[in-house]
C-alpha cells in the first residue's frame, strides 16, 4: 500500500471552474469533495442528509429563508437536512464538502 496525504492546495490548483465539486477521498459511505465558489448559487434543499461546509480559503455565506450564516477560513458549518439554502461568496472561496456517496443535487427546487 502507498501512504500519501491529500494536499488540499495541490488538489485545488488542478481546476479553475466554480460550483463544480471534485471528489478527493472517501470514508465509509461518505465522500470528501473540494469546490471553488464565486457569486451566487441557486436556492436548493438537501432532503435526505445534512451537509458539511468547511472553508479552506475565503469566506462564504449561506442564506436561509429566515437568516444567514457567514463561514470564514478554518470554520465549518453543518446545514441540517431539509433546510432550503442559497450559498454564495463575494470573492472566490475554496470549500471542502462532506456528504454521503448517494447525495443527489437538487438545485433549482421550488421553495418549501
Image (spheres, helix red, strand yellow):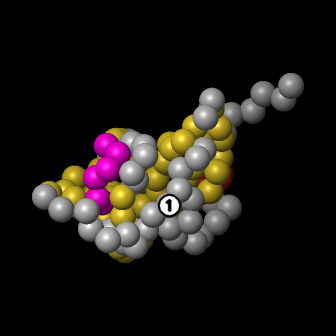
Image side of residue 6 versus residue 100, left or right:
right
Q: Nearer the viewer, residue 101 or 58?
A: 101
Local secondary structure at mark 1? loop
User: For the point 50% across and 43% down, which residue is it?
Assistant: 98
Percent coordinates x, y for residue 79 in the rendering: 32, 46
Image side of residue 97 versus residue 12, left or right:
left
Percent coordinates x, y for residue 54 in the rendering: 42, 45
On the image, which quarter does residue 77 sit in? Answer: top left
On the image, which quarter does residue 17 sit in? Answer: bottom right
Question: From which residue to which does the magenta span run?
Answer: 80-85
User: For the point 39% across and 51% down, which residue is it?
Assistant: 47
Residue occupied by mark 1: 105
Whether residue 2 is visible to the viewer of this picture, yes or no, is: yes
In reply to whether residue 5 is colored magenta, the answer given is no
Percent coordinates x, y for residue 108 in the rendering: 40, 73
Q: Nearer the viewer, residue 102 or 90?
A: 102
User: For the point 50% across and 67% down, which residue is it?
Assistant: 19
Image side of residue 63 versus residue 92, left or right:
left
Q: How many marks?
A: 1
Magenta: main secondary structure equals loop
Percent coordinates x, y for residue 90 in the rendering: 31, 70
The quadrant of the rendering that contains the C terminus is bottom left
* 25, above or below 71, in the image: above
The quadrant of the rendering that contains the N terminus is top right
* 60, above or below 25, in the image: below
- In the picture as drawn, the residue positioned furthest to the left comes out as 66
Whether residue 73 is visible to the viewer of this picture, yes or no, is: no
Q: Nearer the viewer, residue 86 or 22?
A: 86
Amino acid at each position: 500500500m502507498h501512504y500519501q496525504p491529500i494536499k488540499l492546495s495541490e488538489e485545488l490548483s488542478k481546476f479553475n471552474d466554480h460550483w463544480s465539486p471534485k471528489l478527493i477521498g472517501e470514508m465509509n459511505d461518505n465522500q470528501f469533495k473540494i469546490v471553488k465558489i464565486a457569486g451566487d448559487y441557486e436556492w436548493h434543499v438537501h432532503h435526505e442528509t445534512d451537509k458539511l461546509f468547511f472553508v479552506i480559503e475565503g469566506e462564504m455565506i449561506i442564506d436561509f429563508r429566515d437568516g444567514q450564516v457567514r463561514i470564514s477560513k478554518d470554520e465549518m458549518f453543518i446545514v441540517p437536512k431539509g433546510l432550503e439554502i442559497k450559498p454564495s461568496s463575494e470573492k472566490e472561496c475554496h470549500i471542502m464538502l462532506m456528504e454521503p456517496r448517494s447525495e443527489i443535487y437538487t438545485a433549482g427546487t421550488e421553495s418549501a
